[in-house]
Image: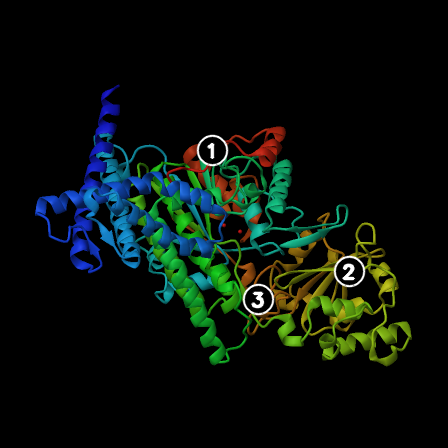
Amino acid sequence: MGDGRWRTAGSALMRVIVVWGVSTITLLALAGILPDFQLQSDDGDSVTKTAFTAAWGAGAFGLLSALVWPVLVRALLIVPAFVLGMLVFFLNGSLLLIALWLIPDGRGAAAPETAVVVAAVMSAVASATSTALAVHDDQRRRRRSGTGGADGEGPPGTVFIQLDGVGHDVLAQAAADGIMPTVAHWLSDTEGHRLTPWRTDWSSQTGASQLGILHGSNHDVPAFRWYEKETGDVMVSSRPASALELQRRAIVRTHDGGLLTVDGASRGNLFSGGADQLALVLSMAARRGKGRRSRAGYFAYFSDPANAVRTALSFVAEAGREIGQSTRARIRKETPRIKRGGLYPFIRAFATVVERDVVVSAVIGDMFGGRTAVYADLVAYDEVAHHSGPRSRDAEKVLARLDRSLALIVKVAEHTPRDYRVVLLSDHGQSPGETFAGAYGLTLKDLVRAGSGLPVPRRAQRTRSGSEARDAVRTALHRPVAGGEEKQLTKASDPVVLASGNLGLISFPDIDGRASQEQLDRRHPALLGTLANHPGIGFLLVHSERDGSVVLGRDGARIPVAELKDGQGPLAPFGPGAADAIRRTDTFPHVADVMVNSMYDPATGTVHAFEEQIGSHGGLGGEQSRPFLLWPRDMTDPLDAVAAEGGRRAAELVGAEAVHRVLRRWLREVSGPQVPVRTTDAVRGAGDGLPGEEEDAGTGAGG
């Protein structure tokens, strides 16, 4: 064995001894503080005997934590997050009771509730001590080798942190108001970072944006969810099987594995980006086989009982915080407001606590491991903003906590074996507004059915919109509706109506291919007019046999897509880029028969989501289409980077695919060219597991 191996073994042994010693002292201190916890016999013991008892108990607890706890965590990966959070305390306390039982002569004893507290403190102290020693050893090795930190040799690594759903203006305001001091420091002249907005595609949501950013193509992703007639399937970006298929299609189209194919790590994302290290990557959850379930990404993080206890405590606190905030909103009768009961407090706690902790831990592990490129998604803000509003106090508090996570990553970068550049970006923003159902009393599906002459619920019939739709049907067909009850006026199959924020998609399964305006007018003569003239709808996109695809708006507005211009007709409120975004989506094979974009009020920035969301994204209108890119000034300007990657230099950054070219350029500048994979290898990787699919055992593990 060489000197290096002896030195490493000696360092590891010394670390175990120090942690054991600190744990022993902690156990002695807790025994002196807590009345229901003892390490002595009833007759009393000498100081030496008590110290020996504490050392025995600390050693037994440490050994059980190292050997038994990982097995328990692996078994509990099938348990829902909330239940796991409750079990963490019980299991950790149980391990301590077992450790005390193993002490000779029965000198260790504790009440069950006290054991929970003692176990939590012991785990936290042991974890903190071990981490501090690991950092010290790493710094000593770097001093010996002359590498690392600010003086490290070799190209720097790059960490891309995606703040899901944070718009450009929201980030800038949060920095200016002191909510995000780390970001504010980056934007200061002394720190030298730059902030720029970029414009999303029509489909302003994570599925389209992140696929384009990580894999270079989001072609044929018209929304978050859409219907594919040839298979009869509904594709949903957050469904593992759909995410895997979207990733496969992107790889086939680009002939490239993705942004992270060279020594990359993908953390908390919908897609892998071609990374060889994965944790909480949704597209990989659809695969079968050992180590391929998405929950496996939790294992490395929760195998440390200190992590488990800390995250479980935060989980419970966050669920309680949401219950308190939603109750306060109801008491104050805040508007707009949606229901936030049921399982939502636990869903929010998972997104804002568990996913954040696991992903940040994984990123830190990647940095200490010296990885070249890391891309991680933090979804906390997006989840809260959907239910509380993008500029609510609830959302601001989440931004503050995310900023602390960024500060931790920056601090860690000072101790990593190579320099790291931290790039911050978002995949979309969010636009506020009352839901479509809240504003008009019926859903988009109800309106479509009413306009098609199909039965709708009584509550929808009683609304003004429902009544007007029924009147339009009667007028169009010259037929009365007896007894106030709708009759099915067509034998056609029911339309499939899907929502993606304020973007709606209507498909008619029994019409082969893309339905035309003429076909729909013959089958449902009142439908398109009902939709186009509704005050909650901005415009429709539909194909015409005579004029090609057309955009329909109120008062009979009908403009061929080829003639669309920003700021005119139905697109007047939607700002620059709307016409091009519509034209691009119109070319997709799976564009819906009717694409419906809600109204947008430029004065208030509001839209109407077709889902139960008061902060939404997915279509055109407002801040949802204006995410951000924040990067160190010494990196190439994004517009120049796009031009260098084969694109043309434009006045602004448009589309997720353009962002991919920017990020790829930045990686190439310090790491050399990344070699595209062969098409057959790429497809095989997307379906059967990209190279090196295992989770990092030392890093821990979103969409």
Element type where label 3 sits in the image: loop
Q: Quadrant of the N terminus?
A: top left
* 335 or 68: nearer the viewer: 68
Q: Position of residue 4 (x, y in %)?
A: 25, 24
Secondary element under disc 1, as helix, strand or loop, is loop
| Amino acid tagged 2 | Pro
At x 32%, y 37%, the residue is: 418
Depth check, mark 3 against mark 1: the one in front is 3
Q: Is residue 454 left or right of residue 291?
A: right
The answer to which quarter of the image holds residue 99 is top left
Q: Quadrant of residue 573?
A: bottom right
The residue tagged 1 is 262
Q: Which residue is mark 2?
A: 495
Residue situated in front as seen by the camera: 699 or 210:
699
Outermost residue toward the right in this view: 478
Q: Amino acid at mark 3?
A: Gln
Q: Earlier in the sequence, mark 3 or mark 2?
A: 2
- Earlier in the chain: of badge 3 and badge 1, it is 1
- List the residue tagged with mark 3: 613
| In the image, farthest residue toward the top | 1
Q: CA distance from mark 2 to mark 1?
A: 45 Å
Cα–Cα span, label 3 and label 1: 38 Å
Residue at x 23% of width, y 24% of height = 6
